[in-house]
């Protein structure tokens, strides 16, 4: 894919004051077609055909704000890799091995009406399949941006399910991106959870602080979040992947969320060509603590079809990068856990001794409670990228 010799369209983006735009109206300017994309990155006829193939499988949606973060002169720009579709997405099984559409086992734990109940204490509600930006590395690629029956039909009924299950201590409203729902809908969802005694806290998982921070210049939304947080603790897990995503506007969005008394935690995905160097992780984690966001998880890229081949970092190389970054970071910046979000539960990757990877399972499936907190050790190969690729020691 080429680019314009003069980056005129990108220069125009620099003159927009994104904080002043109406978040609903601005969505109509999103790049969601090849015609719009080619205004920024000219495409040959051949490129158009293969890109259309990619878009038919995983649509494109890029807000102008997020597009403005791309350095158009750099073909390896990290934001570009996260946002712009690539023909590598046509590779279903590649150099890193087998892939699946559902690596986290969501479908097995689907209770209907958009409820995923995998661990006894957490219930996740898939509130929408829409996101302001369709990330090329999304692990819910099989769902986001596509019509389907995986989202909640009736949130009141979801709240009834949660009220009936007294073992649930926390609820995650997820998607897609729930913050893209109208403020009134978000308010109703939170209202339905407000009086369920056994729910200690609620999380709204969103990438909007990163890709669409203008959402938080809507005062009504901040008031809804503040009001709920007076009754029950609300957290906003978000998803910064690179220091280039930390801008004055995203910082102000985070400040506004925090002004409502809400803690913002970050879940990064470890991605080849995006953040797989020690310097990338250092800059990202230091940048996050600087703006008041807590580094929480660094996810090993899952074996997702159309993602793994070009984005997954081999574990042997990855664990060395993470260990070195942690050596350099201060206590708050290194609070994140390096995690495999596996079907059998979350597994922390602790480090390696020669070719042996040491892991600790931090959540387990209800049918295997004995697996929680167990230590796992597996022999690494150069290309091993997931638990199944390791020769486990018993
Ligand atoms: S915002 Fe989240 S759910 Fe939406 S495409 Fe990105 S990673 Fe996937």
Image (cartoon, helix red, strand yellow):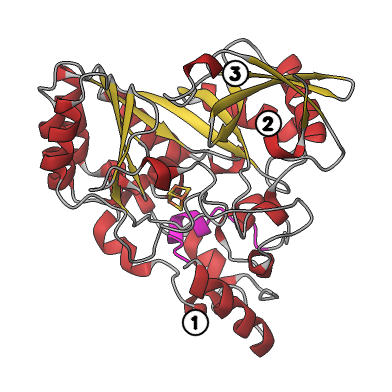
Mark 1 lies on a secondary structure that is helix
Nearest the eye: 387 or 23: 387
**Mark earlier in primary sequence (1, 3):** 1
Contact between marks 1 and 2 (CB within 8 A): the answer is: no
Q: Could you tell whether 234 is left or right of 134 in the image?
A: left
- Who comes first in sequence, dot 2 or dot 3? 2
Residue under pointer 3: 333
Q: Main secondary structure of the magenta part?
A: loop
Residue 335, quarter of the rendered image? top right
Which residue has dot 1 on it? 35
Q: Residues within 10 Å of mark 3 (few under 14, many from 20)?
A: many
Residue, disc 2: 281
**230 to the left or right of 344:** left
Q: Quadrant where the N terminus lies?
A: bottom right
For label 2, the SS is helix
**Residue visible at 39% across and 49% down in the picture:** 212
Q: Is residue 66 magenta?
A: yes
Q: Residue 198, labelled with which disc?
A: none
Is residue 142 shown above or below 29? Answer: above
Q: Is mark 1 within 8 Å of ligand 1?
A: no
Q: Which residue range is magenta in the image?
A: 60-72
Magenta span contains residue 42: no
Residue 35 location, x and y as percent? 49, 82
Residue at mark 1 to residue at mark 3: CA–CA distance:
41 Å
Give the class, few, some or many, for how many residues have Cα within 10 Å of label 1's Cα (few <14, many ≥20).
few
- Can you see residue 212? yes
Residue at 47%, 17% (x, y): give it. Answer: 369
Q: Tell me if the residue at label 3 has its CB under 8 Å from ligand 1.
A: no
């Amino acid at each position: 894919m080429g680019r314009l010799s003069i980056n005129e369209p990108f220069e125009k983006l620099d003159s927009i004051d994104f904080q002043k735009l109406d978040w609903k109206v601005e969505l109509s300017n999103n790049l969601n077609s090849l015609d719009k994309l080619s205004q920024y990155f000219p495409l040959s006829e051949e490129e158009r055909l293969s890109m259309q193939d990619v878009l038919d499988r995983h649509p494109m949606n890029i807000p102008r704000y997020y597009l403005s973060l791309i350095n158009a002169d750099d073909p390896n720009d990290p934001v570009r890799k996260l946002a712009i579709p690539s023909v590598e997405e046509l590779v279903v099984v590649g150099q890193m091995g087998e892939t699946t559409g559902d690596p986290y086992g969501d479908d097995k734990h689907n209770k209907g009406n958009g409820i995923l109940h995998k661990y006894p204490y957490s219930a996740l509600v898939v509130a929408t399949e829409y996101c302001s930006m369709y990330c090329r590395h999304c692990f819910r690629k099989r769902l986001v941006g596509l019509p389907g029956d995986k989202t909640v039909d009736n949130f009141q009924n979801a709240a009834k399910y949660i009220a009936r299950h007294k073992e649930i201590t926390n609820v995650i409203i997820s998607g897609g991106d729930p913050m893209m729902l109208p403020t009134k809908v978000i308010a109703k969802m939170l209202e339905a959870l407000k009086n369920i005694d056994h729910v200690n806290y609620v999380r709204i998982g969103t990438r909007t602080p990163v890709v669409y921070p203008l959402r938080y210049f809507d005062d009504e939304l901040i008031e809804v979040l503040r009001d709920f947080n007076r009754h029950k603790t609300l957290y906003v897990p978000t998803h910064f992947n690179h220091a280039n995503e930390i801008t004055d506007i995203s910082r102000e969005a985070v400040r506004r969320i925090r002004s409502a008394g809400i803690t913002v935690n970050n879940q990064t995905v470890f991605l080849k060509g995006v953040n797989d160097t020690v310097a990338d992780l250092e800059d990202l984690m230091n940048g996050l603590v600087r703006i008041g966001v807590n580094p929480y998880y660094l996810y090993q890229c899952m074996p997702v079809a159309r993602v793994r081949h070009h984005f997954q970092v081999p574990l042997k190389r990855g664990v060395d990068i993470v260990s070195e970054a942690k050596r350099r970071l201060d206590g708050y910046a290194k609070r994140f856990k390096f995690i495999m979000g596996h079907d059998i539960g979350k597994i922390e990757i602790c480090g390696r001794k020669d070719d042996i990877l040491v892991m600790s399972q931090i959540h387990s499936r209800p049918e295997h409670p004995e697996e929680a907190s167990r230590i796992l050790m597996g022999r690494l190969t150069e290309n091993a990228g997931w638990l199944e690729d390791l020769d486990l020691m018993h």
